[in-house]
Image (tube, helix red, strand yellow):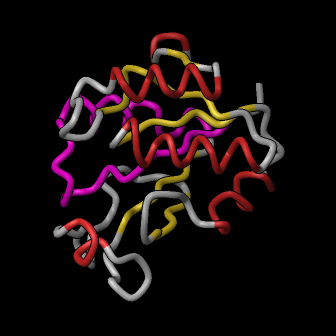
Amino acid sequence: MRQALLIIDVQPGFAPPEWLVDGIRALIGTLPSVATVERHDESITPFEKQLGWHPAPDDDSLIPADRIFIKHGYAPTPQTIDYLKSLNLERVLVCGLQTETCCLAAGFALFDAGLQPTLITDLTVGSSLDRTGGLGVRLWEHHFKHTVRSSDL
């Protein structure tokens, strides 16, 4: 199956658990990989104004992915989606941080682009609302259907 890994916002400013970083790193080199890094620019996305917090302006990915794309906000950039489409994939495996927000936003962007988003349920962490990621997994299954565990890969 032609597939790639999309790693969402695994960066120092969000303090991902070590098990998540280790689990994702174990997949690097086994398939094409793309990581997003969320950076703050209030003129692009008003996190501070609307939410009273913001990501770091200069974070980098903790995962050595083949390609890294900077984003400002929840969803991956059009350039990220275009790159993934150029790989002629059957599915995009999504993992990383904020299952019910940033990962879900990536799922919608992938779906809208005609790609098959597939969440790796044991390599994702939810927001402070639900650190287990359970809410995000249920939303993912409702909207996109496709999930796997890292042991299935």
Q: How far across and how far down the image is residue 92, in percent?
A: 65, 37
Q: Is residue 8 magenta?
A: yes
Q: Is residue 29 left or right of residue 123?
A: right
State the image quarter where residue 16 is shown: top left
Comparing 116 with 139, the one in front is: 139
- Tell me the quadrant of the picture where the C terminus can be found: top right
Comparing 92 with 112, the one in front is: 112
| Residue placed furthest toward the top | 152
Query: Which residue is drawn at the image coordinates 52% and 48% (left, top)?
Result: 105
State the image quarter where residue 23 is shown: top left
| Numbered label tally | 0
Above or below residue 102? Residue 121 is above
Comparing 31 with 34, the one in front is: 34
| Residue placed furthest toward the bottom | 43
Q: How far across and how far down the image is residue 3, in percent?
A: 69, 34
Q: How far across and how far down the image is residue 138, in percent?
A: 46, 20
Q: Tell me which segment is drawn in magenta.
A: 3-31
Q: How far across and how far down the image is residue 5, in percent?
A: 56, 39
Query: Which residue is drawn at the image coordinates 67% and 46% (left, top)?
Result: 110
Above or below residue 112? Residue 21 is above
Comparing 119 with 6, the one in front is: 119
Q: Is residue 57 left or right of residue 123?
A: left
Query: Which residue is drawn at the image coordinates 52% and 58% (left, top)?
Result: 75
Q: Is residue 58 magenta?
A: no
- Tell me the quadrant of the picture where the N terminus can be found: top right
Q: Is residue 111 left or right of residue 30?
A: right
Above or below residue 8? Residue 147 is above
Query: Which residue is drawn at the image coordinates 50% and 40% (left, top)?
Result: 104
